[in-house]
Amino acid sequence: MRAHCPAILSALHELTQAMWHKGVLEADLRELVRLQVASLNHCLSCLALRYVPGKNAGLSEEKIRHLPEFESGPFTEREKWALRFACAMVGKAIDDELFGELRRQFTEAELVDLGLWVGLQHGLGLFNLAFAAEPEPFGTEISV
């Protein structure tokens, strides 16, 4: 796909890199949310590309394994609220109560970073599904 729109895809890569390296969220939380969004999108391509970076960002195998049942899994309250926010954004079910609790867990800068990250990952996942992106071999590295 890069050959068809190289300037746009290059800019998208730069945006992702800027969010990763200049954002205010912790690396492991960012990857945890990215894995959750990939799972919610049912994007095999996204999931295949995210496992190794998640481990490299400090996510434990236990957390990765328990992501589908995060409410009862080994996650901090902060992580659970970030995952709830990801689920709400993907499902378009954000309400005042959720946002009130998010504001107790995160600074405004963190919330903006988190919201942009979820939106970007959700959009990229839908793009991959629309264009039937083939999954890379499991565990493929991506640059972050």
Image (cartoon, rainbow, N blue to C red):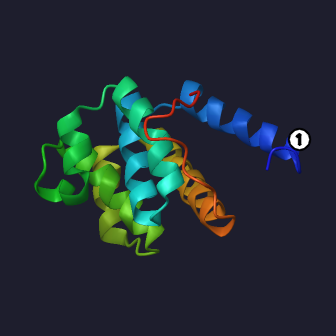
Q: Residue at x 41, y 31 (%)?
A: 52
Q: Is residue 79 left or right of residue 106?
A: left
Q: Position of residue 25 (x, y in %)?
A: 43, 34
- Tell me which corner region of the image, top left, top right, bottom left or bottom right, holds residue 128: bottom right
Viewer-side residue, 12 vs 50: 50
Q: Residue at x 39, y 59 (%)?
A: 39
Label 1 environment density (alpha carbons within 10 Å; few <14, some 14–19, many ≥20): few
Residue 68's image quarter? bottom left
Q: Is residue 28 left or right of residue 61?
A: right
Query: In the image, residue 47 lies at what x, y percent?
Result: 44, 49
Please state which of residues 12 and 111 is positioned toward the viewer in this rendering: 12
Q: Nearer the viewer, residue 90 or 131?
A: 131
- For the C terminus, the image quarter is top right
Name above or below for residue 17 compared with residue 102. above
Q: Which residue is mark 1?
A: 7
Who's the residue at 89% across and 51% down the image? 4
Q: Residue furthest front?
A: 137
Q: Quadrant of residue 124?
A: bottom right
Q: Residue at x 57, y 58 (%)?
A: 125
Residue 141: where, in percent of width, then height?
A: 52, 29
Compared across the picture, whether 95 is left or right of 124 comes to left
Residue 26 visible to the viewer: no
Say how many tags the image has: 1
Above-or-below relation of 92 to 117: below
What type is the residue that disc 1 sits on?
Answer: Ala
Q: Secondary structure at mark 1?
A: helix
Whether residue 76 is visible, yes or no, is yes
In the image, 98: left or right of 135? left
